[in-house]
């Protein structure tokens, strides 16, 4: 199976300024890859290299098995730039129709369907679009021709929560049809529910690539159990994965590292009347990746 993205030692310097250094990464068909990092980390640089909008200083990249500049490859990609500019008197609907023709045709009704789902206004001239509406038009043009590979630079910026949900549904549909998505964000929460893997980039370097399901299983989760009568502390002490145990009368509070299986089995010996389990806090894990190596944000290389 040909990788959708294959980057090997890919680097980009803007003069002496580091944009991206030594990126080696494969993205496979059918996966949703979240590309995370703080401002200035190198996300846009990576995406522009994949789109052949800038040229690498070093290394090699293939997109859908070919050098990214090839016109035939470009037509198989949907791209939302991070700095989308839509100007002029032309109505959004006419602009999208023009882009659709350029890309060799869009299924009938597809633009209207996407506009309804995202609640986008296609009747306004582009210069009058609000930031949120501009972003919606950008998303429609990235999805409308049902491309094999959708590349989205900060796609959720400016979208309200309901529209974000609809957008995530569109991303899942791409995966369901075996196609591939790469989306960047500086907020884990925006991509963790939809991504299969996430890559974390910081100061121009990919510092981690993680499978989200495995990460979720590894993550610490807070659990609270309430029973119909006081329970003995000994029943819960030393259980695998149970930490920070507090037993207060009929309530047990702890954190779980990994699977909750041992705790559930111990609790089953008593009558459980209430159970609360908080979502694992992946954000904490990611913040440690972000802050590793600490304060020196050295974007410059020595002369
Ligand atoms: N055209 C350019 N000229 C000089 N330096 C640049 C240029 N574009 C990006 N950089 C630098 O490269 C580094 C990576 O920037 P990039 O835009 O790729 O980050 P990003 O992760 O997309 O950040 P953001 O979320 O802020 O868009 C930054 O230090 C940035 O200042």
Image (tube, rainbow, N blue to C red):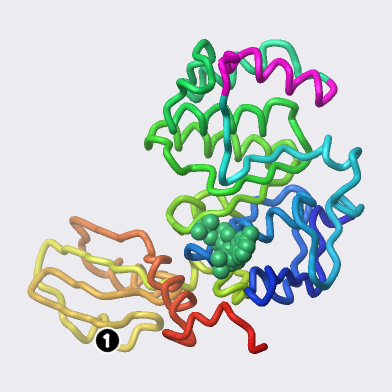
Q: Residue at x 67, y 77 (%)?
A: 16
In the rendered view of the protein, which quadrant contains the C terminus?
Answer: bottom right
Q: Nearer the viewer, residue 230 or 274?
A: 274
Front residue of 125 and 257: 125
**Ligand 1 quarter of the rendering:** bottom right
Q: Which residue is mark 1?
A: 237
Region of the chain picked out in magenta, as a range:
88-104
- 10 Å crowding of disc 1: few (<14), some (14-19), many (20+): some
Q: Quadrant of the N terminus?
A: bottom right
> Magenta part mainly helix, strand or loop?
helix
Quadrant housing residue 41: bottom right
Residue in the image at 53% along x and 39% along y: 168
- Quick check: 250 left or right of 103? left
- Establish if 69 lies above or below 280: above
Q: Nearer the viewer, residue 234 or 17?
A: 17
Direction from residue 84 to residue 257 in the image, left or right: left
Q: Is residue 95 magenta?
A: yes
Q: Nearer the viewer, residue 30 or 243?
A: 30
Residue 152 x, y percent position in the rendering: 62, 45
Q: Looking at the image, how many numbered discs can be counted on the residues?
A: 1
The residue sitting at 79% across, 51% down in the picture is 52
**In the rendered image, is residue 271 in sight?**
yes
Q: Position of residue 76 (x, y in %)?
A: 82, 37
Q: Would residue 198 be seen by someone viewing this image from the given angle?
A: no
Q: Does the beta carbon at disc 1 come under 8 Å from ligand 1?
A: no
Residue at point 76%, 54% (across, down): 50
Magenta stretch holds residue 57: no
Residue 297, position in %: x, y?
49, 80
Q: Is residue 35 above or below residue 18?
A: above
Can you give x and y, in whole percent of width and height, for residue 174 in the image?
68, 37
Mark 1: which secondary structure? loop
Q: Is residue 159 above or below residue 39?
A: above
């Amino acid at each position: 199976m040909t990788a959708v993205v294959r980057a090997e030692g890919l680097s980009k310097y803007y003069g002496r300024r580091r944009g991206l250094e030594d990126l080696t990464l494969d993205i496979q068909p059918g996966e949703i890859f979240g590309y995370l990092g703080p401002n200035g980390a190198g996300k846009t640089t990576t995406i522009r290299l994949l789109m052949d909008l800038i040229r690498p200083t070093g290394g090699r990249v293939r997109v859908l098995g070919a050098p990214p500049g090839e016109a035939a490859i470009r037509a198989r990609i949907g791209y939302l730039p991070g700095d989308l500019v839509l100007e002029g008197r032309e109505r959004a609907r006419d602009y999208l129709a023009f882009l659709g023709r350029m890309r060799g045709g869009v299924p009938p009704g597809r633009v209207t369907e996407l506009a309804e789902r995202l609640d986008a206004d296609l009747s306004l001239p582009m210069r009058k679009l609000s930031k949120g509406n501009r972003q919606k038009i950008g998303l429609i043009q990235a999805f409308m021709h049902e491309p094999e590979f959708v590349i989205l630079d900060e796609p959720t910026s400016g979208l309200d929560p309901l529209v974000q949900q609809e957008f995530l549904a569109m991303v899942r549909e791409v995966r369901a049809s075996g196609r591939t998505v790469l989306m960047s964000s500086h907020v884990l929460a925006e991509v963790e529910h939809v991504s299969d893997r996430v890559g974390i980039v910081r100061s121009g370097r990919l510092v981690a690539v993680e499978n989200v399901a495995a990460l979720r299983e590894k993550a610490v989760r807070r659990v609270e159990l309430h029973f119909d009568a006081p329970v003995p502390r000994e029943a819960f002490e030393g259980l695998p994965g149970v930490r920070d145990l507090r037993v207060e009368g009929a309530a047990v509070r702890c954190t779980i590292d990994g699977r909750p299986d041992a705790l559930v089995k111990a609790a089953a010996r008593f009558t459980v009347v209430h159970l609360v389990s908080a979502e694992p806090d992946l954000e904490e894990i990611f913040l440690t990746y972000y802050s590793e190596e600490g304060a020196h944000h050295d974007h410059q290389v020595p002369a």
